[in-house]
Image (cartoon, rainbow, N blue to C red):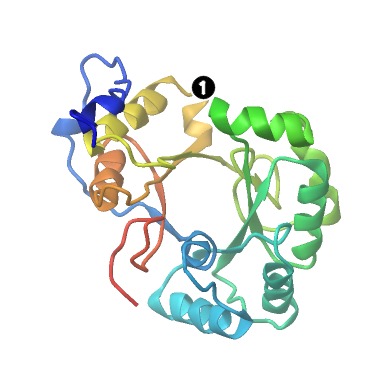
Amino acid sequence: MLQNPAGKYRPFHQVQIRNRTWPDNRLTKAPIWMSTDLRDGNQALFEPMDAQRKMRMFKTLVAIGFTEIEDGFPSASQTDFDFIRELITGGHIPEDVTIEVLTQARDELIERTMESLRGARRAIVHVYNDISEPFRRPAADRMGLPIQPRDLHRHRAGLRQGSGRRSDGRLAADAPAQKVIVNCPATVEVATPNIYADQIEWMHRNLAHRDSLILSVHPHNDRGTAVAAAELAVMAGADHVDGCLSATASAPAMWIL
């Protein structure tokens, strides 16, 4: 046994931010909340949901009142691809609900994702690009470098024009004049919520064209502080929260299904 177990961990790098404002802010309105239960929550389950259970969950989320729902990772799973197709072709998506799907920033995966969304009234395509070196190096060695955000627009051609918003940090299926979502996940929650709030305030202050962006956060619950991280992030300038209702390690747990 280690004499000093805490000594094996490096201190988390703190954001250098002067005159932070978030501690004095108050929560006066709810952020946009996007449910990730059918994607991030599902992949955290020991036994992921089949299509029937996913449909029941989708209809439950709609009944609760969610208008943005991330439904799967269609380029990585035939089950998810078929589920997205059923949602669209079966007419299960209410007019006021926008579905979302996840994909890595690679041509062939984005093409497959766009194929799954064909015919959707509107959709958010959540395109992610790993920026952590331990993630990027093996991925680049195995599959080559990901595409650049400026190249994503060409994948939109196969979709109908819609009225949804989003792009880049997520690519939307509608007019490029719509706002872009930039999502800042706490993929492994290794710092206290105040550190995450500092990171979000730094982004809020320093992102170019801030008025054209929706700053989104995706806290995880490894330390059991995802709800606090989400709340402080909104105080720090976030507009949008990705999260699960189900009590998994992958998101703020609001209640246990």
Instruction: State the residue at coordinates (77%, 39%).
Output: 153
Q: Along the line of sight, which residue is nearer the eye, 139 or 159?
A: 139
Task: Reply above or below: 118 against 105.
Answer: below
Could you tell me the amino acid type at mark 1?
Ala
9 in relation to 172, above or below: above
Place residue 135 in its image quadrant.
top right
Q: In this view of the protein, which residue sits in the foreground, 104 or 127?
A: 104
Which residue is depicted at the point 37% across and 63% down?
Answer: 248
Along the line of sight, the residue nearer the viewer: 5 or 211: 5
The picture places residue 191, in percent across and down from the top left corner, at 28, 34
Q: Is residue 147 among the parts visible in the rendering?
A: no
Q: Residue at x 54, y 70 (%)?
A: 96
Which residue lies most toward the front here? 1
Q: Position of residue 110 (x, y in %)?
A: 76, 49
What is the x, y in percent for residue 164?
62, 56
Q: Is residue 225 left or right of residue 41?
A: left
Mark 1 Cα-neighbour bin, 10 Å: few <14, some 14–19, many ≥20: few
Q: Which residue is denoted by mark 1 in the rendering? A: 208
Report which quarter residue 90 is drawn in. Answer: bottom right
Q: Is residue 230 above or below residue 52?
A: above
In the image, residue 138 sits, relative to residue 107, either above or below, namely above
Residue 158 visible within the image:
yes
**In which quadrant of the rendered image does the C terminus lie?**
bottom left
Task: Identify the image quadrant of the N terminus.
Answer: top left
